[in-house]
């Protein structure tokens, strides 16, 4: 009897595993066929949510759930508080402006552009509900939005949000290594996305080419390529170049609200929009949400991460800071025009040929940044040079010189072998991605499905910023070798079998990574 039960248990366990495997395959296939998204498939298959297991409390770590909630809440309560807070009043400005109006067509367009499967705010209303009722909701929502613009008063719920924490990198027990994302009411986000397009018409005029973050027609590759070209030319002509990679501490969470209103006013944003945004921010509260929620805390500074308005507001304030620095004749001279820095959102790179000038640039930037609440992070701000490593200080602390720096996810260095090292780094990153998807790529799924995963997940990872690569023989071999090895893996073919790569390619029918990256370079 005992042996029979043991055999039955084994059989049932085996059938359960097979059934679960078939179910997982079905879900993954469904998402690959409909959305080409592996992430959404894994999200649907996830049976539980992992919360922060442990947090550092001064000298000791705690696993107590109540204490973890209190630690997180107290951290953000302190982060978002402003000592000696005062209420900023908008000045009386006699500007002739057309009345701010939102058209019904804008609301319909905004509803249609709402993304599905997004977490709702405290109201619990999802984007899917709004999209489903678009035909019936468009008119009353247009009336509501225009009434809000005319009165400058918003529903109280629009100022409320829940903060969820997303782990970035570093010590997972350190609360500062988590990014706070605000879950906002879906109706507010719809209104906010419409307003953002309107205020961007004013703020975009003030943005220089040095800023490539959150702007249509710009990408990370623009700045990576510019920096690589500068390094190459300075190396070629043997001229000194100093590069400082500025890192702000909790940049989006630190902006003083008063600096936002001053910036929007100075950049010609209509008062109707400023009043509405100010009303939301003046009454802004948030609750830290883990497995439970704590009482709401007052948000007295920072822009809400997750709000469509936040990126536009942030780069507008940053432009105001840079505009006050008088850097027209500092930096490096390129055919009579000076290039002092590059910006991608809050990632700033300072450029100079001398340490004295660079020291002055850092001091003035630090001084102006502090006025709006931004603090330069001493530990993450690095310097790179092809010349003498002279000390550069920030508040009596010497900044660190680095041989290489990861800028916008690409390794930057004066090392002659940096091109090959970067490609090797991308190959390693792609292999890590490959093994994280082994449930699909090493399974019995069809080759077509595996090829689709390779195209959507692995190829972008391998060829990121390939537009800036030099395609030497070594680089070509690394790319080709990486892809061929992955193709053998998904087909479960060993090298010892000595099957030609052309035969393997006929089976997988995947895009050739080397040809793809070279086409991107010259597109």
Image (cartoon, grey):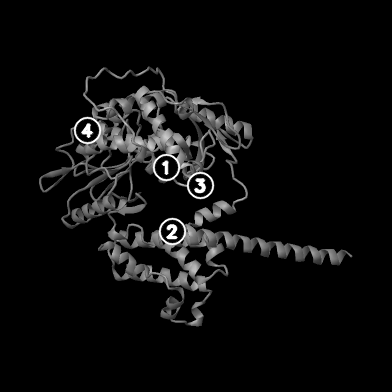
Q: Could you tell which of marks 3 and 4 lies nearer the N-terminus?
A: 3
Q: Could you tell which of marks 2 and 4 lies nearer the N-terminus?
A: 4
Residues at marks 2 and 1 touching, judged by CB atoms closer than 8 Å: no
- Residue drawn at the location 25% of the way across and 63% of the way down: 522
Q: Identify the residue under disc 3.
A: 117
Q: Which residue lies most toward the right here?
A: 1
State the mark number for residue 429: 2
- Residue drawn at the location 26% of the way across and 62% of the way down: 523
- The answer to whether residue 282 is left or right of residue 118 is left
Compute the Cα span from label 3 to label 1.
Answer: 14 Å
- The answer to whether residue 437 is left or right of residue 389 is right
Residue 179, position as x, y percentages in the image? 46, 39
Out of 363 and 289, give the one closest to the viewer: 289
Q: Identify the residue under disc 1.
A: 111
Q: Could you tell which of marks 2 and 1 lies nearer the N-terminus?
A: 1
- The answer to whether residue 485 is left or right of residue 231 is right
Q: Identify the residue under disc 4.
A: 323
Residues at marks 3 and 1 touching, judged by CB atoms closer than 8 Å: no
Compute the Cα span from label 2 to label 4.
Answer: 38 Å
Out of 138 and 164, give the one closest to the viewer: 138
Residue 466, position as x, y percentages in the image? 32, 60
Compute the Cα span from label 2 to label 3.
Answer: 28 Å
Secondary structure beneath label 1: helix
Quadrant of the image for the N terminus? bottom right
Say which of marks 2 and 1 sits in front.
1
Q: Could you tell which of marks 1 and 4 lies nearer the N-terminus?
A: 1
């Amino acid at each position: 009897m005992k042996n029979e039960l043991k055999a039955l248990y084994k059989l049932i366990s085996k059938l359960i595993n097979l059934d679960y495997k078939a179910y997982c395959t079905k879900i993954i296939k469904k998402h690959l066929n409909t959305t080409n998204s592996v992430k959404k498939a894994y999200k649907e298959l996830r049976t539980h949510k992992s919360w922060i297991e442990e947090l550092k409390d001064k000298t000791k770590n705690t696993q107590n759930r109540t204490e973890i909630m209190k630690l997180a809440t107290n951290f953000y309560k302190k982060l978002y508080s402003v000592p000696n807070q005062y209420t900023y009043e908008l000045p009386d400005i006699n500007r002739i402006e057309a009345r701010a109006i939102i058209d019904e067509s804008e609301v319909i367009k905004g509803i249609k552009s709402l993304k599905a499967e997004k977490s709702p705010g405290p109201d619990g209303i999802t984007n899917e509900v709004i999209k489903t009722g678009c035909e019936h909701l468009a008119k009353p929502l247009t009336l509501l939005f225009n009434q809000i613009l005319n009165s400058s008063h918003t529903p109280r719920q629009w100022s409320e949000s829940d903060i969820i924490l997303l782990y970035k990198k570093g010590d997972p027990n350190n609360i500062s290594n988590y990014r706070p994302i605000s879950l906002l009411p879906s109706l507010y986000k719809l209104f906010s996305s419409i307003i953002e397009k309107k205020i961007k018409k004013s703020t975009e005029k003030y943005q220089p080419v040095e800023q490539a973050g959150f702007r249509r027609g710009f990408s990370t590759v623009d700045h990576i390529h510019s920096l690589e070209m500068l390094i190459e030319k300075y190396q070629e002509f043997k001229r000194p170049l100093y590069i400082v990679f500025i890192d702000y501490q909790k940049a989006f969470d630190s902006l003083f609200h008063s600096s936002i209103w001053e910036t929007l006013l100075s950049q010609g944003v209509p008062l109707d929009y400023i009043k509405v945004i100010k009303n939301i921010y003046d009454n802004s509260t948030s609750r830290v949400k883990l497995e439970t929620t704590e009482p709401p805390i007052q948000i007295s500074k920072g822009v809400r991460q997750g709000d469509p308005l936040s990126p536009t507001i942030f780069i507008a304030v940053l432009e105001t800071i840079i505009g006050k620095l008088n850097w027209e004749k500092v930096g490096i001279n390129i055919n009579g025009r000076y290039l002092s820095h590059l910006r991608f959102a809050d990632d700033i790179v300072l450029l100079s040929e001398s340490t004295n000038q660079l020291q002055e640039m850092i001091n003035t930037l630090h001084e102006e940044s502090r006025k709006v609440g931004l603090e330069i992070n001493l530990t993450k701000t690095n310097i790179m040079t092809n010349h003498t490593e002279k000390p550069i200080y920030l508040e009596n602390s010497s900044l660190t010189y680095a041989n290489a720096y990861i800028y916008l996810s690409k390794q930057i260095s004066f090392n002659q072998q940096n091109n090959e090292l970067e490609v090797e780094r991308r190959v390693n990153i792609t292999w890590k991605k490959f093994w994280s998807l082994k449930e699909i790529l090493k399974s019995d799924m069809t080759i077509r499905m595996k090829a689709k995963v390779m195209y959507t997940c692995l190829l972008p990872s391998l060829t990121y910023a390939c537009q800036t690569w030099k395609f030497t023989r070594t680089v070509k071999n690394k790319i080709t070798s990486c892809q061929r090895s992955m193709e053998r893996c998904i087909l479960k073919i060993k090298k010892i079998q000595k099957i030609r790569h052309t035969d393997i390619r006929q089976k997988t029918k995947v895009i050739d990574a080397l040809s793809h990256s070279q086409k991107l370079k010259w597109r």
